[in-house]
Image: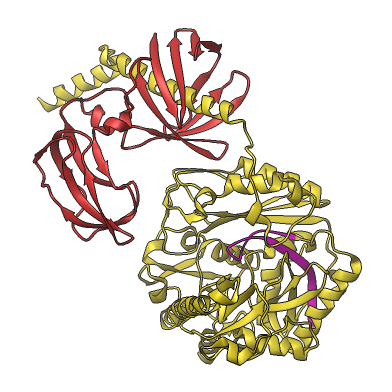
Amino acid sequence: MADYRVYVGNRLFDIRIEEDLLLVNGDQFNFDLESINGNGLHILRDPNRNIEAYLQPNQNGSYDIQIDGIHLSTEVVLGFNNSTKISDKNKGSITSPMPGVIIDILVKEGDFIQEGDTILIQEAMKMQMKIRSASSGNITKLHTVIGDQVNKGVLLVSLDPVENLPVNPDNPQLKRK
Amino acid sequence: MKLLIANRGEIAIRVIRTCRDMNIPTVAVYSEADRNALHTRYADEAILIGPTRASESYLNISALLQAAKTTQSTAIHPGYGFLSENPDFGKAVEDSGLVFIGPRPETMSLFGNKLTARKAAREAGLLVLPGPDQPLSGHPVQSQLGSSLSFPLLVKATAGGGGKGIRLARSQDELADVIDLAREEAISAFGDGTIYLEPLVQKARHIEVQILGDGKGQILTFGERECSIQRRHQKLIEESPASELSPEERSCIITAAHRLGSTMNYRSLGTVEFLMDQNRQFYFIEVNPRIQVEHPVTEMVSGVDLVQEQIQLAITGKIDLSQSDINPQGAAIEARILAEDPEAGFMPTVGEISYLKEPGGPGIRVDSALYQGMEVGSDYDSLLSKVIAWGEDRQSAIKRLKRGLKEYQIGGLKTDLVFLSQILESHPYQTGNIDTTFLDDFEPKELIPEETLTRYAAVATALHIHNKRKSKELQDSGDINPWRQKAWQEQTKAGS
């Protein structure tokens, strides 16, 4: 038996999976999921309706999921009482919050940083923004240099955090364990 | 004969397909970004013409001519966009002894300038929107035009095209600022800041006529297309025939297009564009002297391969068809699949196509440049693909197009697929109550209830994680494969 709390936008689903039982917010369903090519395509069975669900893990621990052409983002934690989303913790990486130019990098590889430290400064639409770390840990890799033009959501810095929450088995950083 | 296609994306593939049907060898050109693009793989030969930046590759006339020379091509098809309406390109192609598959350079120059185009149309007896045939020479506007201006009006670039270089002025107060903006935009987009004013036709419908001329006065018309569903003056959904048009209205617009074509001794494919106002009066707006994005709807109803006719004409100088061969049947609708996010004001989206399934079945045609693994960047146009549906009437074409869009699965980046379905699903669209302001107050309805959709997403995510964890547990529990163990033993034996 395992419990998962899944956030889809503002909605929250508590899902309990047992051997032959699936409960969504306490109601029983007969869903089944099959991966088609290991490439993100899944068939969700409802049980007689076959729904194509295209699912891709994100670097920040959330998932992008596409059903009938509609894109959604989901975030998962283990257990029903854990209210910390993976991406809140954002343990593995620092990504750009908007498109723009990296105008300063205040850390180097190997540095230990505290949660809230400013890591980089990005400029977009003539505004400068401090990008801070959401967690403490060691900088393992810088993926950008000063002057880089980056899109939204681009991985800028990899971080080896002090603690991990092993929930997302797709997260490359967690696979290492 | 060997044909070089001076373009990329779906239109390059479109032209290659017809060439293959005609047994004409093809040459694709590509920029560094398009090294692995579909059009480079579909052509018989492909040749690198320059870096990613269009001005150094797809817009680089000397690189294109050099590529034609290197590959010993004998003709060039320009597609749409890029150099397709550039008279200098047409002239350079013809001057180097190659066949240019398009109108004469003089025709392109004339229609390339919106003011000379208006003048030519007026002289051919077409109704043109009121306004001087002179460009604005500077400020103040008032002294040039007196107090005759009525608002709102459009400030347009004479070199404009593809919906670019058009700005709306709502009142006298903002006119000066809008003119400055339009001029700046026109300079950066077309290298020419000449602008003119045109009254805004409220609730206009965009209707256009496909023509094909032999350059000696013979003009064929292929019926009309309606392209009223637009975002930012750019077409999103096109259909043929236009909905709710009386036979008299249809004949009026087709006759006008025919008259302009024969007055000009028009050569090759072209589209004469009109606006229809609320009094159902047609006004000429412009001529597009090239193949258009929406040409497949005409092909679907007429059964004619327009690109084949265009190439055939360029080779032989003659049109094999006669007007009585063209009898449009049923209705066809095209939807443009864009790398744009309608929820974010049609902002361009980028990403890798991580999963792709294209639609099929009766009455569906897909003209697509997509492939799994393709990196969609922001270097070129956002048009990825087109789905065109044919049906016996407009309603059945709508149903088929809805099916086609539902089957279309593009993973990895946001597109307008769902938005297109929502338009087709809406009452005003279904009843043909459309005009160019359709999207201004369009409120899309959810196609699946949000609760069901989010529950699917949540369950799929939870099950995905659960299954992964389970298979990892299996691996970690020392589940040893006896065959692998055997192989390992053999290997160590051999090594020792």
Magenta run includes residue A44: no
Frontmost residue, A58 versus B188: B188
Kindly give the residue lying farthest to the right in the view shown. B248
| Along the viewing direction, whichever of A153 and A36 lies nearer the viewer | A153
Q: Which chain is red?
A: A
Image coords of residue B397 (percent x, y)? 76, 50
Between B129 and B18, the one nearer to me in the picture: B129
Quadrant in which the C terminus of chain B is drawn: top left
Q: Is residue B198 left or right of residue B36?
A: right
Q: Residue at x 46, y 30 (%)?
A: A10
Asked if B472 appears above or below A174 in the picture, the reply is: above
For the rendered model, the colour scheme is by chain
Residue A141 position in % (x across, y down): 16, 43
Would residue A72 be found to the left or right of residue B440 on screen? left
Our reading of the magenta stretch's main secondary structure is: strand
Left or right, B158 with reference to A157 = right
Where does the image place residue B290, in percent across and percent down from the top left?
63, 76
B455 up-or-down from B6: above or below:
above
How many numbered badges does the structure rendering display? 0
> Vertical placement of A90 versus B286: above or below?
above
Is the N terminus of chain B in the top left, top right, bottom left or bottom right quadrant? Answer: bottom right
Residue B204 visible in the picture:
yes
Residue A160 is situated, as x and y percent measured from the top left of the image, at: 17, 34
Q: Residue at x 25, y 54 (%)?
A: A122
The residue shown at (43%, 68%) is: B30
Residue appearing at x 65%, y 79% in the figure: B198
Q: Which residues are magenta?
A: B219-239
Q: Colour of chain B?
A: yellow
- Residue B107 at least partly seen: no
